[in-house]
Image: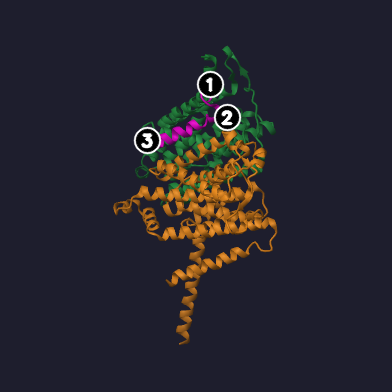
Chain colours: A green, B orange
Amino acid sequence: MDWALFAQQVFYGLSNGMAYALFAIGLVVIFGILGIINVAHGEFYMMGAMIFSWLVAIQGVNLVVAAVIALAVGVIIGILSNRLVVQPIYGKPSFVLATFLATLGLSIFLANLATVVWGAFPINVTTPFSLVVRPGGIAIAGDRIVLFVIGGAVLWLLMQWMSKSLLGKQLQAAAQDAVSARLVGINLMRVYAIGFGLASVLAVVSGILMAPIWTSNPYMGPLVILKGFIVTIVAGMGNFRGAIIVGLLLGLVEAIFGQYVAVQYREAVGYGVMILVLLFKPEGLFRR
Amino acid sequence: MKKYNKHLMTYIVLTAIAAALPLGRDVYVQHLLTLTLILAIYALSYNIIVGYMGLFSFGHQAFFGLGGYTIGLLSLGEASAGRSALPLSLAWPVWATLPASLLVCAIAGYVIGYVSLQMRGVYLGLVTLGFAMLIWMATINERHFTGGVSGVRGIPPFELTLPGLPTLELSSPFSFYYFALVLLVFTIYFISRLTKSRFGRALVALRENEERASALGVDAFKYYLMAFTIAATLAGLAGFAYSYYLRYITPTALGITFLWSAVIMVIIGGTGTLLGPVIGAFIFVFVPEVFRIAEELRLLLFGAALVVVIIFLPQGIYPSLVSLWDRFILRRQERKGIEGEISK
């Protein structure tokens, strides 16, 4: 067995997995707090990646400035989506399906808005970190290291914030029992808005970090959201730690399967696992 | 009985109007009309799941595409096989490809339904979506069998020879329109009979309250599976018409955009009605044409429209129009009644 090749795939898979985890955590935040599935989350990711790539590669804006602008736009889109699309139907009968369909409409809208603005062509962005070093025959891309470091830091900060800060605790309280949370004086509307804003920040962050690794195009949202569904379903809806572990594992399994079984069916593994988990353990692999 | 006749009359008038629509129009409008009818069949089939079962499948596009691909692969002859770079040259005639494609979709619907219908809500949607994505991926990857991304091209024109009758060849949008109209009328008739039958009433009972209906002895899984299989088969019928009409089929037909269009047509038109999905298909095809807008603006528009309809008209356009009309009639009758009182 060629261990360098194996190590290469492990590195490649885990770094993809970090992006999946970062992305899926946003879905988990929204599902945990509001109990709904935000289909447009994939388009929040796409918007982040597109704005960042367009600013850096075409407008020549500084990396950090571009990232800040992308984040700001992401937060605005997230909060507006919550206010205009989700809140009007929230709490009505069968609102879980209604919000699913409404955010599906939003995702179609945003994907095609991006096509109108930027055209259907993919944008490729290179950063000062876009270089490859080869210790021991393993190609290590700088952008993937950046993804690991920043992605890991964001996830760690998120977990700390959720368990330590007052706002984080309020979010968790609302997620556990909305009625009781309101009884102890938590402003649910504010919590929902913050949850949505937070989730869109996470989607935009993963979009920015993946932009130099994958090329970005307006149609990538559905492919990304499907990864997010796989991760959240397999982990168990609303499970934070589970989503991080499953995200990393999904990237790893895809890479290993692609290398040793069939590269063209790499992505099929996730769907297969999702279907099996839904059928045999619909509550997910991790207890909440 | 009188009400039934009134309904029948409405449908005969509507069919006559539909039959007159393409007369004297240019070929492009005829093409759009034909496309509308085919998509209407597809939307009606999706409506069986969404409207009558009250469940959400996000894998319906797979059956539409499977129907189309079955035709594509079975009907290719020697001449066109060379063009499409596929090894198949079966050259099956229409009377054989039609049952074959319906059968493929029925089996696929039965199997996928059997596995996934234990789920409810969004979970059901995601399982069926997973299956559809697997089928989509296989279609793209098994290039030597399906033609990969470029799909199956050079499907022979629709040609039906029955003993004792002249050969029916549909090679223009105009002639295909009437064939599609026959299929649509059949579909509407079939679904209306279905919903009025014991089977359809059981479905509605399940939709309204699954627990109560089950307690009363309706076997939910059995009825859902049967309805799901019927819906898949009808989607295959739409796919059959679609691929014979365009004479090619690509993986797009079983990809996510065809899921979007099904959801848009049914939700905007109106779920659980016979004419809602047809109106949805008409709006879906013609509204962008009227405003002469580009392809990406069209979906942009419908994405926004989907949100607006879900927030403001959760029943869809057609039921809202009907209730508006009923209110109008009622008010007029009331006014007449008052005027009658006064003149007395």
Depth check, mark 1 against mark 3: the one in front is 3
Residue at which label 3 appears? A280
Residue segment shown in magenta:
A258-278
What is the C-alpha distance between the residues marked 2 and 3? 33 Å
N-terminal of the two: label 1 or label 2? 1
Q: Is residue A262 visible?
A: yes
Residue A9, disc: 1
Depth check, mark 1 against mark 2: the one in front is 1
Marks 2 and 3: CB-CB under 8 Å?
no
> Measured from the top left, where is residue A128 in percent x and y?
64, 23
> Measured from the top left, where is residue B86 in percent x and y?
62, 36
Tell how many labels.
3
Dot 2 alpha-carbon crowd within 10 angstroms: few under 14, some 14 to 19, many 20 or more:
many
What is the C-alpha distance between the residues marked 1 and 3? 29 Å
Do discs 2 and 3 share a chain?
yes
Q: Chain of mark 3?
A: A
Marks 1 and 2: CB-CB under 8 Å?
no
- Determine whether A1 is above or below A221 in the image: above
Depth check, mark 2 against mark 3: the one in front is 3
> Measured from the top left, where is residue A272 in percent x and y?
46, 33
Residue at which label 2 appears? A210
Q: Is residue A268 magenta?
A: yes
Q: SS of the residue at dot 3?
A: helix
Q: Is residue A284 left or right of residue A78?
A: left
Q: Is residue B200 magenta?
A: no
Residue type, numbered disc 1: Gln
